[in-house]
Image (tube, rainbow, N blue to C red):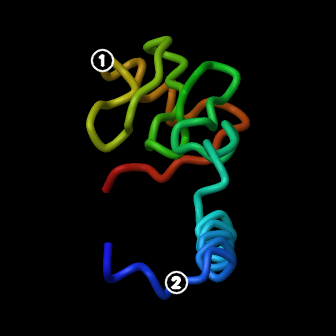
Amino acid sequence: MICCKNFNPIVVAVVFIVVAVVAAMFAPAGAPKTSNLVGGDRDTHGCIGSAGYTWCEPLDKCLRIWEENCYSNEVQEISYLLAPGTIKKLPT
C-alpha cells in the first residue's frame, strides 16, 4: 500500500488510543436507575402517579379522574365528595 508507507506505527497507536478514550468519555453510562424511570413511582395501591393514576376507593382500582369518575352512582359520588379527611372541588 503506497498511501500508508509514511505512517509511523507509534503515531497511529497514539491516535487510536486518543479516539478510544474520547469515545469512552461520551458513551452512555449504562441503563438508568429504576427510580428514574417513568412509571417507577407506584404508590401503596400500585397506581402510577406520573401517568396520572390515583387510587379510587369506591371502585377499588387505579384510574385517571379525567377519563373515568370515581363512583358508580349518585350515592357513591356524594359519599366520595363529602368523605372526611379529603378535600375535593365540588362540580359546578
**Is 11 on the left or on the right of 82, as rendered?**
right
| Distance Cα–Cα, label 1 vs label 2 | 83 Å
Comparing 39 with 72, the one in front is 39
The answer to whether marks 1 and 2 mark residues whose Cβ atoms lie closer than 8 Å is: no
Front position among marks 1 and 2: 2
Rendered view: 61 above or below 12: above
Rendered view: 9 above or below 55: below
**Is tag 1's residue or tag 2's residue first in the polypeptide sequence?**
2
Image quadrant of residue 55? top right
Comparing 92 with 21, the one in front is 21
Q: Amino acid at mark 1?
A: Asn
Q: Amino acid at mark 2?
A: Phe
Residue bearing mark 2: 7
Q: Residue furthest left?
A: 67
Q: Residue at x 70, y 22 (%)?
A: 44
Residue bearing mark 1: 73
Residue 65 - label: none
Q: Residue at x 32, y 72 (%)?
A: 1
Quadrant in which the C terminus is drawn: bottom left
**Is 40 on the left or on the right of 6, as rendered?**
right
Image quadrant of residue 71? top left
Q: Residue furthest top?
A: 60
Q: Secondary structure at mark 1?
A: loop
Q: Secondary structure at mark 2?
A: loop
Q: Residue furthest bottom?
A: 6
Position in image of residue 75 (x %, y %): 39, 18
